[in-house]
Amino acid sequence: MSEANQAFVTLATSDAYCMGSLVVGKCLRRHGTTRKLVVMVSPNVSREACLSLEDVFDEVIVVDMLDSRDRAHLFWLGRLDLGVTFTKLHSWTLTQYTKCVFLDADTLVLCNVDELFEREELSAAPDPGWPDCFNSGVFVFRPSLETHSRLLEHARMCGSFDGGDQGILNTFFSDWAIKDINKHLPFIYNLSVNAIYTYLPAFHKFGHQAKIVHFLGRNKPWHVPHKQQPFTEVPQWDSNRNLEKFVNLWWAEYYSHTKLQENESHELQDAEPIEQLDMLAAAPCSTHVSTLPHRSPTSAASPTTPPPHPHSCESVSQAEDREEKIPSELLGKLTLDASSSSTCHQLEDTSPEPDVLSAEDSEDLEKSEQQEPQAEQKQEEEEGEEVLGAEAASDTARQEALKENLENRKRWEEGRMDYLGKDAFENIRLKLDEFLT
Amino acid sequence: MPLARSISVTSLSGLEEWDEEFDLEDAVLFEIAWEVANKVGGIYTVIQTKARLTCEEWGENYFLVGPYMESNVRTQVELIEPPNAVLRRTIDKMNSSGCKVYFGRWLIEGSPYVVLLDVGFTAWSLDRWKSELWENCGIGVPWFDREANDAVLFGFLTAWLLGEYAAQCEDPPHILAHFHEWLAGLGLVLCRQRHLPVATIFTTHATLLGRYLCAGNVDFYNNLAEFNVDKEAGDRQIYHRYCIERAAARCAHVFTTVSKITAIEAEHLLKRKPDIVTPNGLNVKKFSAMHEFQNLHAQSKARIQEFIRGHFYGHLDFNLDKTVFLFIAGRYEFSNKGADLFLEALARLNYLLRVNHSQVTVIAFFIMPARTNNFNVETLKGQAVRKQLWDTAQTVKERFGKKLYESLLVGQLPEVSKMLDKEDFTMMKRAIFATQRQCLPPVCTHNMLEDSSDPILTAIRRIGLFNSSQDRVKVIFHPEFLSSTSPLLPMDYEEFVRGCHLGVFPSYYEPWGYTPAECTVMGIPSISTNLSGFGCFMEEHIADPTSYGIYILDRRFRSVDDSCNQLTSFLFQFCQQSRRQRIIQRNRTERLSDLLDWRYLGRYYVSARHMALAKAFPESFVYEPHDPTSTTGFRYPRPASVPPSPAHSLHSSPHHSEAEDEEETYDEDLEAEKDRVNIRQPFNLPNKNKSLVEDLPEKN
């Protein structure tokens, strides 16, 4: 079977999950997969987030249930509560591929896992909470329209016992637990890091073999900044050190990605800065881009940046902390414990772009941060020479205003509004009065 | 001693008869609050009790709008199809655009229609809506404030609902939307920003900032005008919430608060003077029998006395018939609720009663829930001992009765000395010995978790009120809500209130104050303050509140020490009253309940609605604000007969002989009649030519 007809599939249902999808795609690439990468996004994901996904994935598929006029649409209307689930089941319609491996956006791949394609539908790892059920965060399947419609029918008839896709899939593939042991993926392909504490000795023994970790539960890695350095306690998570390390690994992966992006976007921006700004103005959601800490202020306008979680922008609040901390020793010293250090070796060994993770690189990064203000000035000067003076000035002014607007909203999001200055209610009142009169 | 009185009064202050031509045929009313079918705090009570009256006025055109909470819907709401075609289309349209909107009847008095919006279901729109809010109003909402983010979702959903409704109407609609509290306020701002054809009313029940400032031990009312509001809100990290609240107040066609005192607060903190004050009412339960509430008082009091007998076993050296029960109840906010002042006043009262060799004993209950480890053993033992004594007495009585019977059967008069034999005496002696007690009756009925730092217990230790026999004031702290299933004091709150003599609520911050209002409708006198909405309202409408059993403490213009002295003198006066005086006072208090009925107070809301309609749709509605000079302002007159004397004999002598009272004339019926003249019945639209006497309502 041709490898070109096989793909890893992931799913993003919000801008926050795009961060996760991005990391999934990026780590698969870094560990040198030979398969295609596909991400399905729901229509509420912002355009900017999609653009940033396009850089990593071979295919970004928008799953819009409202546009389609088929049964699926009707089904969805009947069962609005299963909206997100529906999107996941949609992966069976990817019939351009013969076999796929689905990875949840909250997973982190630690080494090459292409061997998963040797498995058959439906292969998955047991759920830590109920090992007779499989966890639907990682599974192997064969796209088929027939299976898809049967799944939908099944969902409509039986519903989901847990309200999500895992319930539907487990009742649909109900013989998974007993029929074929080859369809049982080892737990190391779907290691639920939040559940480790329940069997700590096992984790110490086998944890270093983990290939895919899964951040189950409410708190996702993008909710928790890895400001805790060197490895201090994180109050939001259980005091599980190991978990913390995986979170830091996740962030390392996230940054390795955005770092690459940055260089590209600089080039892009030189070409057509104003158009991008226009686009930004049209889509206020993109205000998030400014929240990425290690970007230069000008590159904030780049549409390729992934926005952080929209509901709880913790990542934003920690922006500055991250700025100094992205690197050096963090990436160098990411070890899982003396006993489980091999995971780390894997990470370094298999990395096709070791320089991304090297300490030198992060020094560069710091340097470039210092240089950014100058670079920006220079750029503005160049513009001034090229275009008519007045026009350039107004463009710059617009750009400045826009940037300030974004900065401002970010501060509100963090609860740091300037209530004694420009955010005083007097100014809000003026704004209200615009439409009151 | 006749007193000058003003009986010629007509209606509530500032509210003359409204325009009778007000035609509400084609208008619809949406009332929007986070606590519709969702109990969180006091707003729920307001909306729930008011619903019946509003339903009567608006009928099928009245819709409450709240958040969808599954557990609440299951217990309180019957989901049905909307009977109104426009609303049905509106809801269908929204549901097909990715919302979840439910419609039903709220199963409360009046069974109003409710529209429930599933806030969580539209959470994916949060970011888009927050951007819109930011672009249009310059207000952002921090990601970590869940409640505020819910407010954003709820606000956008209500604005969507109202906008969609307006769009679905064939004729230009007259929509009236009434928003309660900041959590719903954003919907109002958006209605105005989108220029929807909606007349808007915003009601704050308490301001956000006021609550925070008072909780922080700030000299609030004296500095009201000086606060830098932006800074205070910002420093307390509630700036975004504050902005939403103030924006709503700013944008509303009509802005209202629940009391005069909150109006002053709003004027300074939200920078808008309320257009009208809309006080909160109750649904007053009327008994068919006159004075039924007096009987209920006697029954409940007997049960409290039983509890006291057990609680003070071994120390029952006071006369329960001369014991006065006081209580304070509410959320455990030590200084906001005035528990600090009450304790201090009790200490002073104790001193006064002792030096005056008073026969009266005062028992003060504190009903304020705190963290506990259940009942303490000593209190439970008290009730058990009492039970045992009762059983012993019953047994002896049985045997006594039997002997008596036998002796009568044989035609002999019983010989008293032989009636009780040795065995009986032994049994009784044993029972009496069991009541011996080494320790004092406990102050607190429960084991407190934070015993050493608890503010009430700390204060009691400082003032030394430990229920010793010399003390005329005893204290019982019940740190749990009352329940009729409690093994200790098996009464619910209402029964308990009925059994007490006086409710004491010397609150520092109390926007309305349902607790004294509830006392009043049950005919129990109460002490409130001129910083509580209730106190202000009563002060305004009654010429001599004290004789009606409404003691209003001045905490606004006096120092704490002076207020404390005043409270002490109120309590002392109350203790001096004879039983008869207390009964008269309760009768008067109970008559005030008409004043607190929604049937009566609802008119303020009516007025606010008319005002809003006239402002938003001046071509269809007219509201004539009445010339304030033409209304004399309603006052309950002084009672026709002489009030229970301590109120005015205060300055003459603290000892008030009961003989004097007996001479005073008191005619219940006459008084009641006169009082009744002074409250106009609601929706009995007044004819200006009618004389006041003709306007007399039928008795219900």
Image (tube, rainbow, N blue to C red):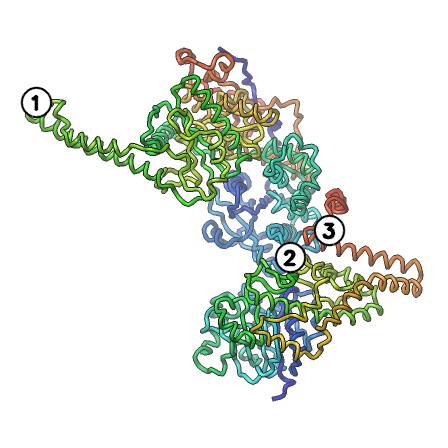
Q: Where does residue A420 sit, x and y in percent of width and height? A: 74, 44
Pointers 3 and 2 in contact (CB under 8 A)?
no
Instruction: Indicate left or right for B83 with A360 as reference.
Output: left
Q: Secondary structure at mark 3?
A: helix
Q: Earlier in the sequence, mark 3 or mark 2?
A: 2
Q: Where does residue B246 sit, x and y in percent of width and height? A: 67, 42
Q: Earlier in the sequence, mark 3 or mark 1?
A: 3
The quadrant in which residue A145 appears is bottom right
Badge 2 density bin: few <14, some 14–19, many ≥20, Cα 10 Å: some
Pick the front one: B617 or A421: A421
Type of residue at label 2? Leu
Q: Earlier in the sequence, mark 1 or mark 2?
A: 2
How many marks on residues? 3
Residue B569 seen: yes
Which labelled disc corresponds to residue B136? 3
Q: Where does residue B547 sit, x and y in percent of width and height? A: 49, 20
Which labelled disc corresponds to residue B269? none
Instruction: Indicate left or right for A221 with B305 as reference.
Output: right
Name the residue tied to disc 1. B412
Q: Where does residue A213 sit, x and y in percent of width and height? A: 57, 72
Q: CA distance from mark 3 to mark 2?
A: 15 Å
Q: Chain of mark 2?
A: B
Name the residue tied to disc 2. B126
**Residues at marks 3 and 2 on the same chain:** yes
Q: Secondary structure at mark 1?
A: loop
Q: CA distance from mark 1 to mark 2?
A: 93 Å
Residue A67 seen: no
Type of residue at label 3? Asn
Q: Residue at x 9, y 28 (%)?
A: B406
Type of residue at label 1? Gln
Badge 3 density bin: few <14, some 14–19, many ≥20, Cα 10 Å: some
